[in-house]
Amino acid sequence: MGDVKAANILIDINEDVYLIDFRGVYTKGWVEKEKSDSIEGYLQGLQNIKRRPFELLLNPES
């Protein structure tokens, strides 16, 4: 856990959203390192995605 970031979001032709690839990696700026292996880390990453939707559409690696 801890790899929750915009680059790990897929949207299909039906506009269904899939969150992928959350295992094994820590991405600085998305989840605090000490929370990277927890449910709290997932929630923190998802909150970061929700806070910056337009920035993420223009630059998903930001």
Image (tube, rainbow, N blue to C red):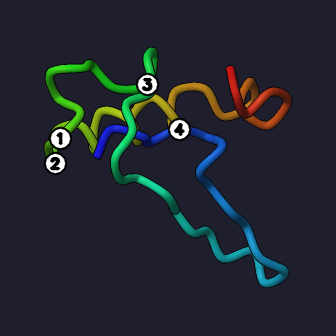
Around disc 1, counting alpha carbons within 10 Å, would you say few (fewer than 14), some (14 to 19), or many (20 or more)? some
Asked whether 47 or 60 is in front, the reply is 60
Identify the amino acid type marked 4. Lys
Q: CA distance from mark 3 to mark 1?
A: 13 Å
Q: CA distance from mark 3 to mark 2?
A: 14 Å
Of the image marks 1 and 4, the number of the one nearer the N terminus: 4
Q: At 27% across and 42% down in the image, what residue appears?
A: 43
Q: Which residue is mark 4?
A: 5
Identify the amino acid type marked 3. Trp
Q: Secondary structure at mark 2?
A: helix
Residue 45 falls in image quadrant = top left
Identify the amino acid type marked 1. Asp
Q: Position of residue 2 (x, y in %)?
A: 33, 38
Q: At 23% across and 33% down in the image, what residue appears?
A: 36
The disc at residue 37 is 1
Q: Position of residue 62 (x, y in %)?
A: 68, 20
Q: Are marks 4 and 3 in contact (CB under 8 Å)?
A: yes
- Disc 1 versus disc 2: nearer the observer: 1
The disc at residue 39 is 2
Horizontally, residue 53 falls left or right of residue 32, namely: right
Of the image marks 2 and 4, the number of the one nearer the N terminus: 4
Residue pushed farthest front?
Answer: 24
